[in-house]
Amino acid sequence: MRRTLTSLVTLLFLFSIVLTACSSSENSSVKDFNNGNTVTLKMYSWRTQDKDGYEKIIAQFEKEHPNIKIDFEPFESTEYNNIVNNALVSGTGPDIIQLRPYDKSIPDNGDLVALDDLKGMENISDEFKNAAKGSDGKIYGMPLSLNNAVIFYNKDLFSNNNIPVPTTWEKLIEASKKLKDKGIVPIAQSGKAAYLLSLLHSVIGPSAYGGNDFVNAILKGKTNFKDQKFVESVKRMKELSKYFPKDFVGITDDDAKALFYTGKAGMYINGDYRLEEFKEENPDLPIGVVPGLALEDGGKPLVTTWVDGSYAIVKASKHQKEAKVFMEYLASKEFGQLFTDTFNRVSAINGVAPKDPIIKEIAEANEANSTPYLLLVNFSQGTPTTKTTFENALQGLYVKKATVDDVIQQTQDATDKWFKPTK
């Protein structure tokens, strides 16, 4: 009996050692990663306004991975491309970079690590992964978020002046006329940076050319940018300009945003990511949102959507293993929810639900009836790209150096140089 008891005690002791060893092994993957040495990963982004939010998110990651530190370094958007390209050419720079959406230039240069097998990629829809694919079909970036181009409006200005919230193109014009008659800037729009004009078109255009039916037709070569439906979309862009601030081509987007959040303008058309900025500038601003314009009264709004960049691992990094651990965190639902809650934006990760009522409204409208940001998602290639040609031509239209026909012709000419319709 004593021998049996002794044997049992010995077995229990050995079992406890095994459990301790297993526990130590599990913890070592987090606490003693890289043999206890601390590795710092440099991470580049073009969104300077996100720095405080990322510090919060990164702190959570570092808490779980104390031997991996993230140095988040954002740059001005207009300078970012040159900074990244120079860093990649020199071979000394960041470990992780934020990729522009639908831009194949960096993935095709061979400077990045393919992420097709990254844990968590299964949480992201294939259509979103296309934003970070190279010409070889491999995925080089972890999609971050979904942007939606929307119309923000000042609830008080509309209700106090008995102006119905616009839901169609015709009602948008009616609302703009009434605001202008009241001495209120109808739409706070900047035209100084050309990309703002194609972004504006992404909201106005679909209600003219019909959304996905036209998109599918042009991608298959059944029509092109000379289609009268697309021509109509450019005519609407010209018509809308009479409701912009005076000399809007010369003012910056910051000027336009200020007109809106100080209550001097009734509407502001841009990406839903501007919501957080407005809340910071004026927490009391009574903001409403039109997710998109419907084709007809009572119809569902057409919500323009696209992936807003993705994060990639630089092949020249000496810490690819650690970078991959961080990328897996970015692909997790934990990060997706934290990102959405921090920035009030729609995550690209499936199953993440926004809590902010405005972002939730946009996300639900997106799920019901979305259309791609045509010029960005499908026509961001060529030298210069079709998108760049289009928005520069729009600037010419607004300063009376080009006609609607010129805009159409220049856009089609740029497309013909590279575009091959899908089968």
Image (cartoon, rainbow, N blue to C red):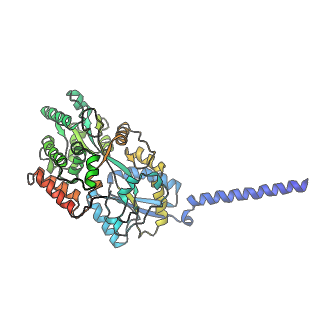
Say left or right for 111 vs 1.
Answer: left
Vertical order, 329 against 292 (above or below): below
**Number of numbered tags placed on the structure image:** 0
Residue occupying image coordinates x 55% and y 62%? 33
Viewer-proximal residue among 133 and 85: 133
Viewer-nearest residue: 6 or 128 = 128
> Residue at position x 37%, y 45% from top?
345
Q: Percent x, y for residue 231? A: 16, 48
Residue 409's x, y, as percent?
14, 56
Locate the C terminus by quadrant.
bottom left
Q: Position of residue 269 (x, y in %)?
A: 24, 43
Image quadrant in which you'd find residue 43: bottom left
Residue found at the very far left of the displayed protein:
400
The residue positioned farthest toward the bottom in the image shown: 90
- Residue 148, given in percent of the width and then of the height, sits at 31, 46
Residue 189 placement: quadrant: top left
- Left or right: where 16 falls relative to 23: right
Using the rendered view, name the quadrant where residue 96 is placed.
bottom left
Left or right: 186 as drawn, with respect to 346: left
| Residue sitting at x 48%, y 57% | 328
